[in-house]
Amino acid sequence: MKLVAAGQTFLLEHCLSCPPSLQAAHLLPRIIRKALSEEKRVSTKTSAADLVTETDHLVEDLIISELQKRFPSHRFIAEEAAAAGAKCVLTPSPTWIVDPIDGTCNFVHRFPTVAVSIGFAVNQELEFGVIYHCTEERLYTGRRGQGAFCNGQRLQVSRETDLSKALVLTEIGPKRDPATLKLFLGNMERLLHAKAHGVRVIGSSTLALCHLASGAADAYYQFGLHCWDLAAATVIIREAGGIVMDTSGGPLDLMSCRVVAAGTREMATLIARALQTINYGRDDEK
């Protein structure tokens, strides 16, 4: 699967494939599956609920080092580098946006919903995304203008427009102060009062968004979602026929730490209108 961008030809399958360029990346799912069952050294970042392990760092370093070998002029935005102080600035340059382990809390507790997410942007436009569900061995891919797939099968979003018939996905976010929790629970309560079939939290935003892309859920929203959680999934959802936008109802801002996604614009708009904003700041201002 080829992608022409910035005067170069990229091979999407190189993100998780064998020699010559990313041979080490082929080991990522095995590294994560093995570490899932082992004891871990766990640290915290922004809050007691914002966790990181040595495996997060190992996987991120492996992805970036292998990509740099093939694309030395490219830029990177990556979760653990950002936590260590690297700036999250999306420039027109070719940029890889990496989440080494999405669902770290799940990973720490051996709950198997964990994924690797790699997005790619050129001229500040998202071009393709790859998300790998490590324990179920599901590879989700999307390329702008070329569709979205899971293990080679084309993805199609739900076409539901009625909130009272919808299954909605979300994540809690790392802030757990009383005011934030009140807003979070209030948003969920408003959707349930609107008679949504259910609201689900699975602990991995990238895989929740993949469920949306596959039609297994009708909508997703979150405050506190970072650009590395969203980049790859945005391409996959759009290529599956869905909508990804700001919680205000406007266009998506990848750095805004807020998102609504749905199979239809009608559903996305209904969700956005029901939400009260939770302020997480911006990725490019931290």
Image (tube, rainbow, N blue to C red):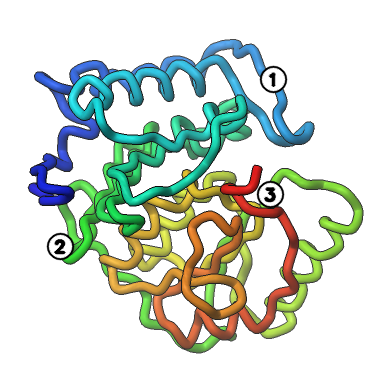
Label 2, residues with CA under 10 Å away: few <14, some 14-19, many ≥20 = few
Picture coordinates of residue 87 (x, y %)?
55, 37
Name the residue nearer the viewer: 112 or 48.
48
* Spatial separation of the CA atoms under disc 1 and disc 2: 40 Å
Name the residue nearer the viewer: 47 or 90.
90
- Amino acid type assigned to the residue bearing label 3 in the image: Gly
Picture coordinates of residue 108 (x, y %)?
61, 25
Q: Which residue is mark 2?
A: 146
Name the residue at 58% across, 65% down.
221
Element carrying mark 3: loop
Q: Which residue is mark 1?
A: 43
Label 1, residues with CA under 10 Å away: few <14, some 14-19, many ≥20 = few
- Amino acid type assigned to the residue bearing label 1 in the image: Ser
- Up the image or down, 191 lies above or below 100; here it is below
Label 3, residues with CA under 10 Å away: few <14, some 14-19, many ≥20 = some
Q: Can you say which quadrant of the picture contains the C terminus?
A: top right
* Spatial separation of the CA atoms under disc 3 and disc 1: 17 Å
- Amino acid type assigned to the residue bearing label 2 in the image: Gln
Name the residue at 50% across, 82% down.
267
- Up the image or down, 45 lies above or below 122; here it is above
Q: Which residue is mark 3?
A: 173
Picture coordinates of residue 274 (x, y %)?
68, 81
Element carrying mark 2: loop
Name the residue nearer the viewer: 246 or 263.
246
Picture coordinates of residue 109 (x, y %)?
63, 27
Q: Earlier in the sequence, mark 1 or mark 2?
A: 1
Going by the image, does 269 lie left or right of 132? right
